[in-house]
Image (cartoon, rainbow, N blue to C red):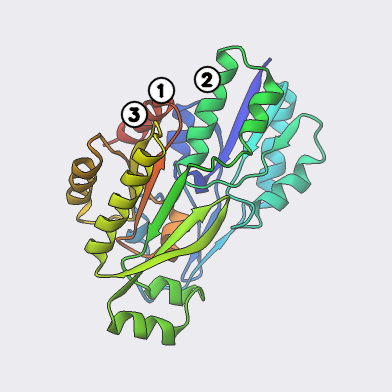
């Protein structure tokens, strides 16, 4: 069976990185001060902050329908199955738009996504691994839509400025948070962003969340790898070393996807426990490091 895989830029991969995995790509849109960019092509999670400043007006948008239909039509003719794995259906209109277009093609399946960032490519690499090991297609496909209860992702913004600019936090609340040096912690769970905790001083909150994730993994006896994603944080090497010391293992490192990072702001950190296979994690880390 010939299968084509499509991801979008909310995966955190650029088009070039996706192609290294033999996957196809749909860029989400980012408009900065009235100029439109294709995410993952014109801008990436590694250089997004070169294109705007804290006062910039920024908007994100779904992939243009014409581009989606063109790619679906081409791949549906060339393959037995086409699997599309977009940003979480709770975070964007992307899933709904893709699902509507897919109805025109009998062999195009859009995953009812509850994932974002590195969860998408890791889940797909495990999907490909399962197929290679002989698991049937339908069983492997259903697993892409399952949220692992033991999976935990915590997002810690360095500043609330972009949350205010995007309407996700009121100016009054942000002013109080700044005066009290409050750092919010946002949990990504089953495709949604939820309040998790708050603390004082960014670096201390990072340390506490690292300890929380490590302790939970040990208590639940999880076979997991600590993960740290960042939005061009200049202290990233220090945070990596700190997480390695706390967890006692090597850390998976990547960037927060551009379409998320422009809302969380520069220097934001995301921490997680990666429960996907070691083989998939190493393969993805190799792709992310290959252009360094």
Which part of the image, by quadrant, shows the N terminus? top right
Q: Which residue lies under the disc numbered 3?
A: 286
Q: How far across and down, in percent of the image, does residue 123 sit? A: 53, 33
Q: Is residue 133 above or below residue 41?
A: above
Q: Are circles 1 and 2 on residues that touch, CB within 8 Å? A: yes
Q: Secondary structure at mark 3?
A: helix
The tally of labels here is: 3
Numbered label attached to residue 129: 2
Classify 10 Å Cα crowding around label 3: few (below 14), some (14-19), many (20 and above).
few
Question: Which residue is at the far front?
Answer: 219
Point out the tag, 2 or 3, that comes first from the N-terminus: 2
Q: Is residue 281 above or below residue 50?
A: above
Alpha carbons under labels 2 and 3: distance apart = 16 Å
Q: How far across and down, in percent of the image, does residue 145 sit? A: 64, 39
Q: Are circles 3 and 1 on residues that touch, CB within 8 Å? A: no
Classify 10 Å Cα crowding around label 2: few (below 14), some (14-19), many (20 and above).
some
- 16 sits left or right of 23 in the view: left
In percent of the image, x 60 and y 44: which residue is there? 86
Q: How far across and down, in percent of the image, does residue 174 sit? A: 39, 81
Q: Nearer the viewer, mark 3 or mark 1?
A: 1
Q: How far across and down, in percent of the image, does residue 283 sit? A: 39, 26
For the residue pair 99 and 116, the one nearer the viewer reads as 116
Q: Quadrant of residue 107?
A: top right
In percent of the image, x 74 and y 33: which residue is there? 108
For the residue pair 120 and 107, the one nearer the viewer reads as 120
Q: Which residue lies under the disc numbered 1?
A: 279
- 38 sits left or right of 3 in the view: left
Classify 10 Å Cα crowding around label 1: few (below 14), some (14-19), many (20 and above).
few
Point out the tag, 3 or 1, that comes first from the N-terminus: 1
């Amino acid at each position: 069976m010939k299968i084509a895989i499509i991801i979008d830029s909310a995966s955190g991969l650029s088009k070039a990185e996706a192609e290294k995995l033999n996957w196809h790509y749909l860029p989400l849109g980012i408009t900065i001060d009235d100029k439109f960019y294709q995410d993952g092509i014109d801008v990436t999670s590694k250089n997004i902050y070169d294109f705007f400043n804290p006062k910039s007006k920024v908007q994100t948008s779904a992939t243009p329908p014409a581009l989606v239909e063109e790619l679906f039509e081409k791949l549906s003719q060339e393959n037995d199955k086409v699997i599309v794995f977009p940003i979480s259906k709770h975070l964007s209109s992307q899933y709904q738009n893709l699902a509507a277009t897919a109805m025109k093609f009998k062999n195009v399946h859009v995953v009812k996504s509850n994932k974002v960032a590195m969860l998408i490519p890791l889940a797909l690499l495990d999907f490909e691994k399962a197929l290679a090991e002989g698991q049937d297609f339908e069983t492997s496909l259903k697993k892409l839509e399952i949220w692992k209860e033991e999976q935990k992702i915590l997002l810690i913004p360095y500043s609330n400025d972009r949350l205010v600019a995007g309407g996700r936090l009121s100016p009054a609340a942000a002013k109080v948070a700044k005066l009290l040096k409050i750092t919010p912690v946002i949990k990504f769970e089953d495709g949604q962003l939820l309040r998790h905790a708050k603390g004082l001083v960014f670096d201390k909150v990072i340390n506490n969340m690292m300890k929380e994730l490590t302790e939970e993994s040990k208590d639940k006896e999880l076979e997991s790898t600590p993960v740290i994603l960042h939005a061009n944080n200049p202290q990233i090497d220090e945070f990596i070393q700190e997480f390695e010391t706390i967890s006692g293992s090597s850390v998976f490192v990547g960037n927060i996807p551009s379409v998320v990072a422009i809302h969380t702001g520069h220097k934001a950190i995301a921490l997680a426990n990666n429960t996907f296979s070691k083989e998939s994690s190493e393969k993805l880390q190799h792709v992310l490091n290959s252009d360094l």
